[in-house]
Image: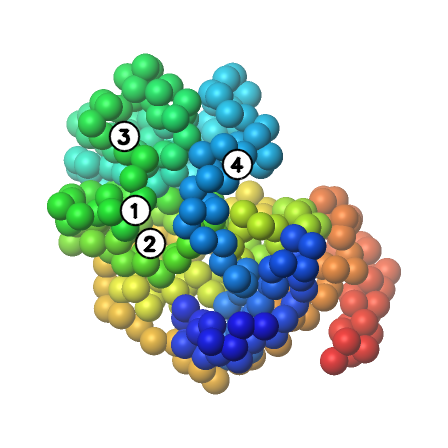
Amino acid sequence: MNEKLTCLICDSSDWHMYCKIDNGNHDVLICKQCSFCQLSPIPTKGELDLFYASKYRDQYSNQNTVDKNVISYEQLRADRILKVLRPYFSKDSRNILDIGCSSGTLLQNIATLCDDKPIIHGIEMNDNYRKHIIKEGIASEDNISNQDIGTYYLGKEGKFDFISIVHVLEHLQNPGDALYSIHNLLSDNGRLYIEVPNMKTPYAKLVGEYFILYHLYYFTGYTLEKLLNKYGFNIIKSQQIANTSVCFICEKGAITEIDKSESKQEFQKVLSRLTYYKVTFPIRKLRPHVIRTLDLLGVKELAKSLLKRDQ
Ligand SMILES: [Zn+2]
């Protein structure tokens, strides 16, 4: 275990090693002080650049080009996001940005919430997806970038009235640096929509499917909220979304530090939950009422007894 590694939220270096992945080359670590969870070591920027430029869409979503399937998948996602976002979105938003904008479908949908046609901006690493956005006239070539967010924000401070970042933060090398950049990009009254997979409600088997090389950080609603607070965001709205994810709508606010007595309890809760899913997968893919029935049949008790054995 890397003893020098400090937690992005609470600065502790006291880690629990939950499992190893990638043939034992990387550990999944959970901070014992606050439950923040990450991969260690984090792959280098060079390794990540190579991965995203070549293999990512092939391996992760099977889609290296934009087609009907991509659009319909992203439209469903956009419908879901707009449902949450609509009451909190400023209709007079002028410049809007989606970080990891994919086919641009979400941006097109967000634009429909504005009274006047906004100026659409996006950051997307995949060449084919950027070409699609330009070809379809969703945004101008000047406003679609493949820059790293830490470089992108320079010269654009306070420019954006709305920023979205959906299922991206968990892939970035340093989510703290990304939130710092986003805070700088956002106008004083601007709003941020952020969504990540929720470690407490994983969409797949934990080891090897959720804890996997291209997910570098593993958030819960609790840890993402604390990280957002640390980088000066106030939470306006948060909720579980699409069964497997958690989303926040934020505005700029005061920097708040974590309450360590509360966060230690959260570590125990997370550990219990992960042990529970180790036992119950793949039943979580079943409908909630079926899961509740299985809980009644004693699966929860089994998980509890295994947890005791682990400790
Ligand atoms: Zn921590």
Which residue was labeled with disc 1?
149
- The furthest residue to the front: 46
Seen at 29% across and 39% down, the residue is 147
Seen at 60% across and 34% down, the residue is 59
C-alpha span from label 3 to label 2: 18 Å
Crowdedness of circle 1 by 10 Å Cα count: few (<14), some, many (20+)?
Answer: many
Amino acid identity at mark 3: Ile
Which residue was labeled with disc 4?
56
C-alpha span from label 2 to label 4: 20 Å
Q: Where residue 294 appears, x then y in whole percent?
A: 82, 55
- In the image, 280: left or right of 164? right
Q: Where residue 206 appears, x then y in whole percent?
A: 68, 54
Q: Quadrant of residue 309?
A: bottom right
Mark 4 CB lies closer than 8 A to ligand 1: no
Crowdedness of circle 3 by 10 Å Cα count: few (<14), some, many (20+)?
Answer: many
Label 2 residue SS:
helix
C-alpha span from label 2 to label 1: 7 Å
Give whichever of discs 3 and 2 has the lower sequence position.
Answer: 3
